[in-house]
Image: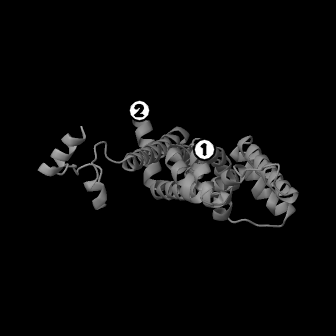
Amino acid sequence: MSEFIDGIQRCLTVYGPSYLEGAGRTLLISLVGTFFGCVIGFAVGIVQSIPSAKNDLLWKRIIIAVAKAIMKIYVQVFRGTPMMVQAMFIFYGARMVFDIHMGMWSAAFFIVSINTGAYMAETVRGGILSIDPGQTEGAKAIGMTHFQTMITVILPQAFRNIIPQIGNNFIINIKDTSVLSVISVTELFFVHKSVTGALYLFFESATIAMVIYLTMTLVASALLRMLEDKLDGDSDYDLATTDTLAYTSGLLSYRPKKKTEEELLAKEARL
């Protein structure tokens, strides 16, 4: 046990700043990748939800069908293959086929973003379908286009429903960035491999990396839970309004006017 503790101390003494730098890069890649992945997911979700009626113009139906087919292929490919394979395919394939030499940061951001976007596309589509269809019908009844309906009516409501999944994807990205070490992205797992290659302290270095990953995911989970609670609002609240008519409605009482003696005599005469 003492050898294990001494090994951990040695790793931290020699490569402590490298572990922290790797953890910082992991967080940055995860944050940027999740953000742009959400943007891609929302865009794909909007395209997938575009209605196509038989009375639409032929060219419009063809464009919508082709766009939906492309989006479906994109989602299926990136959800059905590991990120490690995607990283090698994109990084080395872009260099060999298109002569595009991607840097470490650009490759990491791009790969994590498009991978997250494929998962977020299905999440957004499910969030859109969870909204009452009457919301869409009401928006279109007042003349809104499909894009306006999505941006101003449906997506704001769907966003609240899919926040837990967005947080889940962020936590997954914190861990999955470790596969980017295959294309020499110097994140936390790459630092761990470098330390083991230099000091041959495999178990000790793996323990340090595991603790750092666990700390990042636990903190991210706590912050996301706080965000969800904040969006839920208070459990007890009073309805507030500044409309004076709203205050007075239901409070006015109708008091019938007293009838004069002549009106009463006239009524008795009619009877």
Q: Secondary structure at mark 1?
A: helix
Name the residue: 56% across, 49% down. 135
Q: Amino acid at mark 1?
A: Pro
* Quadrant of res 187: bottom right
249 on left or right of 79: left
Residue 91 x, y percent position in the rendering:
75, 58
Residue 47 x, y percent position in the rendering:
71, 54
Mark 1 / mark 2, whichever is N-terminal: 2
Residue 143 x, y percent position in the rendering:
63, 61
134 on left or right of 256: right
- Say whether residue 146 is visible: yes
- Seen as rendered, the residue at the extreme top is 1
Residue 1: mark: 2
Q: Which residue is mark 1?
A: 133
Q: Residues within 10 Å of mark 1 (few under 14, many from 20)?
A: few
Contact (CB < 8 A) between labels 1 and 2? no
Name the residue: 29% across, 52% down. 249
Residue 198 x, y percent position in the rendering:
58, 51
